[in-house]
Image (cartoon, rainbow, N blue to C red):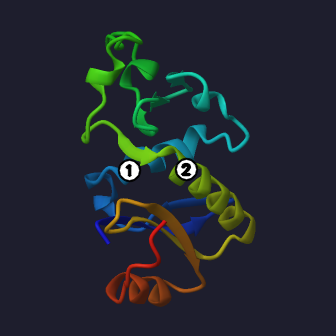
Amino acid sequence: MKEHIKLYGSSPNTYLPLEKKWNNNSLSQLFSLLLGDFRPWDNKFLDCNVNLYNANFIYHDFEHRMLHIGFGDWLIDEEIDSPSREEFPDYVNESNSCKINVDNYLEFRKKWVELKQQLPSFAIIYRDDKDWIDCKGFDTQAEMESFVQNYQPEAVH
C-alpha cells in the first residue's frame, strides 16, 4: 500500500480523518472532494477537460485517460489567480492534485457511495502498489489497523 487515509464515522453521515497527517499524501486532494463537492451523479468530467466545483477541480487528461482531482485555492480566494483552461495541463502535479485513472475513479465512486450507505464506523481510502485507489469500511478501528498492517495486494485491476 503506497498511501492511505484512515477515517472515522462522524455525524451527520460524514467521515473525518483519524490522524492529523492525512494531508501529507495525494489522497488528501481526493478526500477534499469527497468531503465537500462530491457529486456521484455528475459525469461532466468525462466530456469536459476542466471541471470546477465550489472549492475543488477535476482536470481530465483525455490523452492518458487520467483525472487530476484537487483543491482550487482560487475558488475560495478571489486574490489568487486561477490557471486558464490551457494552463491546466502544466498546473496539475503531485502536490496539488490526486492522479487517478478514469476507470478507477468510476469504480471508486461507486464503492464510496455503497460505503456511505452502509456507514461502517471506520473507513480507509488507500492507493495500492499498482496505483489503484480503493476504499473499505470496518466495524472497529482494530480491524482497520489490522488491514493496514497486514495489507496484501489484491488482484490486478
Pointer 1 local density, CA inside 10 Å: few below 14, some 14–19, many at least 20: many
Pointer 2 local density, CA inside 10 Å: few below 14, some 14–19, many at least 20: some
Q: Tell me the residue at 58%/30% (across/down).
A: 45
When the figure is inspected, residue 33 is found, relative to residue 116, above or below; the finding is above
Q: Residue furthest front?
A: 63
Q: Which mark is residue 28?
A: 1
Q: Secondary structure at mark 2?
A: helix
Find residue 68 and report its image quarter: top left
Please report whichever mark, 2 or 1, sits nearer to the chain's N-terminal start: 1
Find residue 130 and report its image quarter: bottom left
What kind of residue is marked 1?
A: Ser
Q: Tell me the residue at 46%/38% (across/down).
A: 65
In the picture provided, is 23 more to the left or to the right than 119? left
Where residue 150 appears, as percent x and y from the top left, is 35, 89
Circle 2 residue: 103
Measured in 3D between alpha carbons, the distance from the residue under mark 2 to the one under mark 1, in whole angstroms, is: 20 Å
Query: Which callout, 2 or 1, points to the residue nearer the camera?
Result: 2
